[in-house]
Image (cartoon, grey):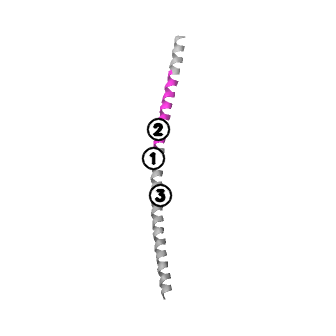
C-alpha cells in the first residue's frame, strides 16, 4: 500500500514537472516571438520614415519644377507680348 502511494506521488510530481517544463518552453517561445515582432515593428517604422522622407523630397522637387515652368511660361508670355 505504501508503494502505491509512493508511485502515485511520484507520478503526480513527474506530471507537474512536465507541465512546468512545457510552461517554461512556451514562455521562452513567446518571448522569442515577441522580440521578433518588436524587430519587425521597428523595421516597419524605419521604412515608413524613409518613405515619408522620399515623398517629401519628391513633393519639393515637383514644386520646384512647377515654379520653374510657371516662371518660364510667364517669361514666354511677356516675350510674346513684347513682339
Identified at 49% across, 38% down, the residue is 30
In the rendered view, would you say 49 is above or below 31? below
- Residue 78 pos. (x, y %): 48, 82
Identified at 50% across, 35% down, the residue is 26
Magenta highlight range: 13-35
Residue 47 is marked as: none
Residue 52 is marked as: 3
**Which residue appears farthest toward the top when viewing the image?**
1
Label pair 1/3, CB-CB below 8 angstroms: no
Residue linked to disc 2: 31
Asked if the stretch drawn in magenta spans residue 8, the answer is no
Q: Nearer the viewer, residue 48 or 27?
A: 48
- Residue 75 pos. (x, y %): 47, 80
Residue 50: which quarter of the image? Answer: bottom left
Which tag, 2 or 1, sits closer to the chain's start?
A: 2
- Residue 55 pos. (x, y %): 48, 61
Amino acid at each position: 500500500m505504501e508503494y502505491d502511494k509512493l508511485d502515485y506521488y511520484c507520478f503526480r510530481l513527474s506530471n507537474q514537472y512536465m507541465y512546468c517544463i512545457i510552461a517554461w518552453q512556451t514562455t521562452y517561445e513567446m518571448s522569442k516571438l515577441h522580440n521578433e515582432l518588436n524587430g519587425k515593428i521597428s523595421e516597419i517604422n524605419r521604412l515608413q520614415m524613409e518613405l515619408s522622407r522620399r515623398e517629401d523630397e519628391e513633393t519639393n522637387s515637383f514644386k520646384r519644377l512647377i515654379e520653374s515652368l510657371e516662371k518660364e511660361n510667364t517669361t514666354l508670355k511677356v516675350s510674346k507680348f513684347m513682339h
